[in-house]
Structure formats: C-alpha cells, structure tokens
Image (cartoon, rainbow, N blue to C red):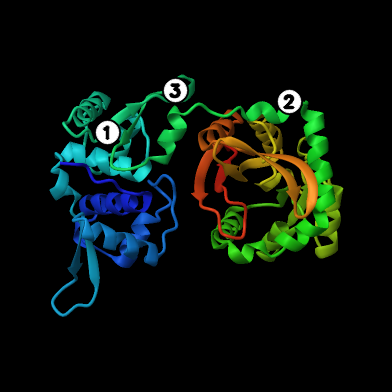
Amino acid sequence: MALPVLDPTEQRIIGSLLEKQRTVPASYPLSLNALRLACNQTSSRDPVMDLSERDLQDAARTLKDRGLLRLVWAGAGSRVVKYHQLLDEVLEPADDERALLTVLLLRGAQSAGELKTRTERLHPFADKEAVEACLARLAAAPEPLVRETQMQHGRDARWIHLLGPVPQAEQLVAPSADLETVLADGVQARDAKVFAAYDAVAPAYAEQFGEELITKPFDVWLLEHIAELNEGPIMDLGCGPGQIAAFLADTGAEVHGLDASAGMVEQARAAYPDLDFSVGRFHQLLRPRNAAAWGTILAWYCFVHLAPSELASTLRSVSATLRPGGTLALALHTGGEVLHVDTFLGTTVDLDYVLHPRDQVLAAVADAGLEVAEWYERKPVPEEAQTVRLYVLARRPE
C-alpha cells in the first residue's frame, strides 16, 4: 500500500482531527468552525497557521475524494456538516503509533524527548525509551511512516513523518547559507550602507507603508495583543516613519520611537507630531525619562540586516532597559538565506536582508537571557515582500 502524501494544509486537518478525536471525543466529529479553530490554534502547532474556511473546505474535498476523510451530518434533519478522519482506517496504527503520528503531523520535526512530553494526552508513554522503540517500529515498517534526521551543529536528532513534506526537515539536513557574509566589509561599512539607503528612500517608504496594516490583519491582532500585555511606556525600536508607533499610541499606550535613519525620523515627526521620535542606534537605547524601564520594546523588522552572530548580543543590550516581566516583541524575515537588493522603491541601494532561521532566532533569544513566551509564523500577503514572517514575544524574567 502506497502511503498517502499530504500537503501542509491536509496534514494540519488530519492531525487536528486525530488529536480532537482523542482529547474531546464528545465534540467529535468536528464542525467546520471547530475544525478551523483546531487547525489555527496558537498552541501545540508548528507552524501556527491562519487557514480560512475556504482553505479547509477545498482541502477537505480533496481528502474526501482520496478516501482520507468523511463528511458526517450532525443529526437527523441537521444541515450542519461535520468532519471525520479516515487515516486510522487506512494505516491501522497502534495506539502509541497513532499518538506519535498525530503530534508529528501537528508540530513537524521533534526529538524523542519532545514527543514524550507532547503525547501525554494521547498516549502515556512510560519513558523516552518507549517513544524511541515505537519510532523505530514505525521506521522499520514495510512502508516506513517516520524517519530520523540529524540536526545541525550537534543538536539532538529529530524525527519526521513521511506522509508529506515537512518544511523544517529541509532546514535540518540542508547545508546552511553563510549568513555572516553581510559582515564581509565590517560592521561600520554595513551600517553605513543601511543608514544611507533608508535615508534615501524615507519619503517613498512613508508613502508606501504608512497604511500597511490595512492589509495585515494578523499583525493588527498581534500588535493589539502586545498592547494588552504592556505595562509601562513602549519603545518602538527602528520605528521608521512611525506608523506602528502611531497604531500602538491609538490603543492608549505611551509610545516613543527610535531609528538610526534621520530621514525616517523626519517622516515620523511630520506625520505624527504628537509622538516622540529620536535619532539613535540600538546600543544607544536608554531607559525612559519618566519610568525606571520600558514596559515593552518593539523591534519590528529592525534586526533584518544583522548577522546571526550579532543577534544575541544585540538582544541582550536592548533588553537591559526592559522592566522585569516586560516584553521584547520581534518581527523578522525567516528562511536561512541572504537576499541582496539593488533597487528599493525606485532608488538605487546596496542592502542585504538576512532571513534568519527560526531556530537560530529562538536560540539567540534564550542566549540573551530572555524567555520565549509566544512565537508565530505567517505567509506573506500579496502587498509585501514574499518572505515568511517570524514573530517572537520574549519576556525578561522577573
């Protein structure tokens, strides 16, 4: 029997149905709304997704045609359609195998220890060795369902399912690009090019991105969430023309902006004269004048030109001005390569954008002495550069 090959949306649907069938049997099968909530959970999912009802209906139709999903009516005379997975019937896994496949479908590549912890509600493995034995059994099947892959840099081995592509797995085994090349001419030369570029494009940048949040509902939600968590003044680091600072100020927060580009700060001051914007660099960040520390530091795409070797020290320096319990909110491009740009908004520039691998960012946050509270990934919207976006909310320990 050939194994079914599932795309990422199909993996999320089947994984969510497998999970909810065990954890909330009274609510199973799932309605379309319940399925969407299960697929788009921000916990126990990697990556976090934002699937629409149309996305789910299209994928469910394909799964149904392939005999992997059944549509069930809620009851006699009911017009509510519910969704039931049939992967159990196709693969006939044992209970322990089913638990591991469920979590691998939902969270991508994981170590045996992580799988032991994350399958507690699905199957109580006695210990890590029991997990490894089950994984070995799945890997040795006539049609292997999992395989082991070695992480780079000597990290623990990870396991992935073989029911379709696992994006993280490609990052685990592929040789990484040299992201340090952005420092080939030294830090000062890199910084000079970055500052000159943003000064040159500042007016066009303000016009292009001043209303960008209109097309980014996830960013709006996350910024509102950050404002709700905040206690104290907010620093918008790398504030650009001030549109994010203005959005946060509209929530009632006290917001200040700092940017190394004088041209960007000029645009911000002109657009939002009631807010405080200053010219300065990351390492020059001081504590607020009217408080002991910042309640939140927002670093929205302001570290996209840094090499990986600079991340942890920069985060450590910046977070020194953050109150205990405060939030450092990061937005970055992710992927594992350097994108060079010669022309930006009609202006000739010499810019390198670093697409930091997610694991390196999370490791840098930890190395800076911060605790990762939440992180998200989202696909690009049509109106922006076509890179995957990574958002991290990190907390300074009390």
Would residue 181 be seen by someone viewing this image from the given angle? yes
The answer to which of marks 2 and 1 sits earlier in the sequence is 1
Crowding near pointer 1: few (<14 within 10 Å), some, many (20+)? Answer: many
Would residue 260 be seen by someone viewing this image from the given angle? no
Q: Disc 2 or disc 3, which is closer to the eye?
A: 2
On the image, the x and y values in percent for residue 91 come to: 16, 43
Task: Residue type at mark 2: give it.
Answer: Ala
Task: Residue type at mark 1: give it.
Answer: Val
Q: Residue at x 79, y 58 (%)?
A: 204
Q: Which mark is residue 155?
A: 3
Crowding near pointer 3: few (<14 within 10 Å), some, many (20+)? Answer: few
- In the image, residue 214 above or below residue 180: below
On the image, the x and y values in percent for residue 331 come to: 61, 47
Instruction: Tell me the residue that label 1 is attached to.
Output: 146
Crowding near pointer 2: few (<14 within 10 Å), some, many (20+)? Answer: few
Q: Nearer the viewer, residue 369 or 81?
A: 81
- In the image, residue 109 above or below residue 253: above
Task: Residue type at mark 3: give it.
Answer: Arg
Q: CA distance from mark 2 to mark 1?
A: 41 Å
Say whether residue 213 is left or right of residue 147.
right
Say whether residue 107 is left or right of residue 290.
left
Q: Quadrant of residue 50?
A: bottom left
Instruction: Tell me the residue that label 2 is attached to.
Output: 184
Q: Residue at x 25, y 43 (%)?
A: 121
| Secondary element type, mark 2 | loop
Number of marks in the image? 3
| Secondary element type, mark 3 | loop
The answer to which of marks 1 and 3 sits earlier in the sequence is 1
The answer to which of marks 2 and 3 sits earlier in the sequence is 3
Quarter holding the C terminus? top right
On the image, the x and y values in percent for residue 105 come to: 31, 44
Say whether residue 148 is left or right of residue 87.
right
